[in-house]
Image (cartoon, helix red, strand yellow):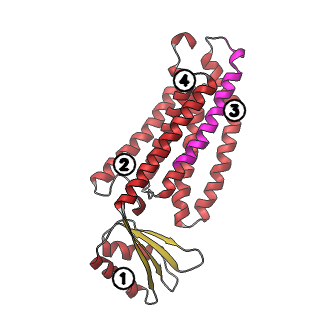
Amino acid sequence: MKIVENRKKFFAASLIVIIIGFAAMIFNAQAGRGAFQYDVEFTGGTSFDLDLGQEYEQEDLQKIITDVTGKDSPQVQQVIGTNEVTVKIQSIDSATRETLTNAILEAYPNAVMGEVNDVSGTVSHEMQTAAIKATLIAAVAMLLYISLRFHDFRAGGSAIIALLHDVLIVLTAYAVFRIPVNNTFIVVLLTILGYSINATIVIFDRIRENKSAFHANQTAEKINKSISQTLARSINTSLTTFFTVGAIYVLGVPALKEFALPMMIGILAGAYSSVCISGSIWYVLLPKNEK
């Protein structure tokens, strides 16, 4: 496998996807929908419980909420095994709330409104800050660990760049598919970082083990050989996780699908970056006399 020799093609493919993501963010922002579809947990808003008292179609309930409030893509989460739901929308005033209640009661006469909660912008800001801090701390810890383990700061740097690639791909998925950005967003990012760095370290370990088998000017061949030797493991590990999360996406409720879809995309992005990106970046960062 000539991974290093074809690195420009792999870099270009990733760059195209990332550019699509940024284009989607700009387009959404210009359209007034926001770069991402932030859940009320991040932007602040209104959350209320509702017992519809009968079977219902989620799309019908969402349409009623959207028509009354003018808010796009309200979050409707069903309590499994019941007709109870939790609805999350951007902040609405008391008059709109009353109009919405009447519209729901007209469509579902047996409905009973439950507790209404307002999520403040202060709490939402704290959650955003916590998400950024968690990601940065994880990245710095990985950079130090890999640099110390392989006695090469360039190894740590290339791994972090590959992780940044994975984060940008996941952000692209959130922007393009308008996946709600909520608490699970933090979980998805940190989980993807963990999976991706694990696969990258396996490859870097094999590169170190193969060091004595190649001459100093055969770095590209050494990296390619190491990737080939670990390819089956990387693919099997990623596919096992991908199919498991895929089952959750197919069989799960909407709230689980919001977690499963970006996870599936992130798993594929992590496998791709570990095999096609990380080793090549390490090669690019090496001085000419070590290639």
Image vertical order of residue 29 relative to residue 281, above or below: below
* Residue 213 higher or lower than 7, as above or below: above
The residue tagged 2 is 24
Distance in Å between CA atoms under marks 1 and 2:
34 Å
Q: Position of residue 28 (x, y in %)?
A: 33, 53
Q: Which residues are magenta?
A: 189-215
Say what amino acid the circle numbered 2 marks.
Answer: Ala
Q: Nearer the viewer, residue 239 or 164?
A: 164
Q: Distance from label 4 to label 3 (Cα)?
A: 23 Å
Q: Can you identify the residue that label 4 sits on?
A: 153
Q: Which residue occupies the foreground of this view, 255 or 280?
A: 255
Pointer 4 or 2: first along the chain: 2
Identify residue for label 1: 101
- The dot on residue 11 is none
Q: Is residue 186 magenta?
A: no
**Image marks 2 and 3: residues in contact by CB distance under 8 Å:** no
Residue 203 is covered by the magenta coloring: yes
Q: Are marks 1 and 2 in contact (CB under 8 Å)?
A: no
Element marked by disc 1: helix
